[in-house]
Image: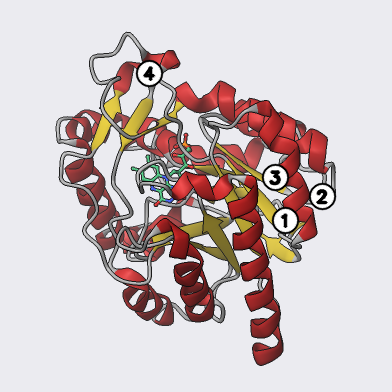
Amino acid sequence: MPSLYPLLRPLIFSLDAETAHEAALELLNSLRFLYPKSTVLKPVSVMGLSFPNPVGLAAGLDKNADYLPGLLRFGFGFIEVGTVTPRPQPGNPKPRMFRLSRHCSIINRMGFNNAGVDHLLHRLGDIGQRDYVLGVNIGKNLTTPVEHALDDYLVLMDRVYPSADYITVNISSPNTPGLRTLQNEAELEQLLSGIAERRRQLQDQHQFDRPVALKVSPDMATQAVAPIADKLRQHGIDALIATNTTLDRSAVQDHPLAQQAGGLSGAALKEKSREILYLFHQELGDDIPIISVGGIDSPQEAQLRLDLGASLIQVYSALIYEGPGLIKRMARSITTNA
Ligand SMILES: Cc1cc2nc3c(=O)[nH]c(=O)nc-3n(C[C@H](O)[C@H](O)[C@H](O)COP(=O)(O)O)c2cc1C
């Protein structure tokens, strides 16, 4: 794909962040026939799945699986759609997404705006045969009390199990009140044991297994890492996704938008995301693979995460700042241990 992004970026950045995001995705989907699909092959095997390359799209960009044909032109080895909730919901009032351009960062408080699981499954049904790995990221509806969150996750497991290559349990968005409390030890125990039990039932019913990943926040105390790692092992979770966005504003405190409510992503999250990766890798070793996400914005940063112990990486904010050519540049240059 020729690199038009440096030309298009000023136009895109002249629009409000969410409008630009939607317009770019619509444009991309309609122009997809101009661009042949070509994926860099650096095959890796993780969670029992074969990935054409280890560079993936993080959750939240294609919440409803509406843009897969266009996004695949970027050359991702895997794409995570969602977060999807059982019922459709509008999310928070707009504006709810802000660019902090001089920090190559974003603050968002989207609040799981999505068209619901029926819509997502309908979209996936249209796609047919896939030559990439598809993750489905699941979360609870805003109106479901956090004490009943498990019910929503179980409904979603039942529904997406046949269509997803892997399922991500998202308990780390800062924009759904109470969601992150599910990372506390007692709550996590209850959640993961419920999920593990349902997974066994689904495995019996369908006669195939689906790997399950847990996506965590970067805003945890160092002491919280070991107990979470234990729970992952205990309940047979197949991968850890680290990390979601941060509430910490120390890296952007000089910016006029720094006090906007929501989760911060992009370059300002880089240090924290590296640190959490390092800490979890110390605990998990090679037992449970880690998918590193947060501030990955260059082939060098992608390589660093793999060298720090990640098996796969995901990108979101850097796509907006660097453009889609970044994905193939990363995939071409990295060396995996596979
Ligand atoms: C606008 C926006 C929406 C997001 N929505 C979701 C979401 O629905 N579910 C989720 O697990 N993560 C979501 N994320 C977090 C990303 O998947 C990723 O974990 C985070 O942005 C850090 O990666 P990055 O620095 O490459 O952006 C969202 C991020 C952004 C910027």
Density class for disc 3 (Cα within 10 Å; few <14, some 14-19, many ≥20) is many
With 288 as the anchor, is 210 left or right in this view? left
Residue behind mark 3: 228
In the rendered image, which quarter is residue 162 located in?
A: bottom right
The residue at 30%/62% (across/down) is 143
Q: Are marks 2 and 3 in contact (CB under 8 Å)?
A: no
Q: Which mark is residue 309?
A: none
In the rendered image, which quarter is residue 225 located in?
A: top right
* N-terminal label among 4 and 3: 4
**Amino acid of disc 2:** Ala
Residue behind mark 2: 338
**Amino acid of disc 1:** Pro
- Measured Cα–Cα span from mark 4 to mark 3: 31 Å
Residue behind mark 1: 43
Q: Are marks 1 and 2 in contact (CB under 8 Å)?
A: yes
- 124 and 24: which is toward the camera: 124
Way the structure is coloured: secondary structure
Against 46, residue 14 (above or below) is: above
Number of numbered discs on residues? 4
- Measured Cα–Cα span from mark 2 to mark 3: 27 Å
Give SS at disc 3: helix
**Amino acid of disc 3:** Ile
Density class for disc 4 (Cα within 10 Å; few <14, some 14-19, many ≥20) is some
Residue behind mark 4: 103
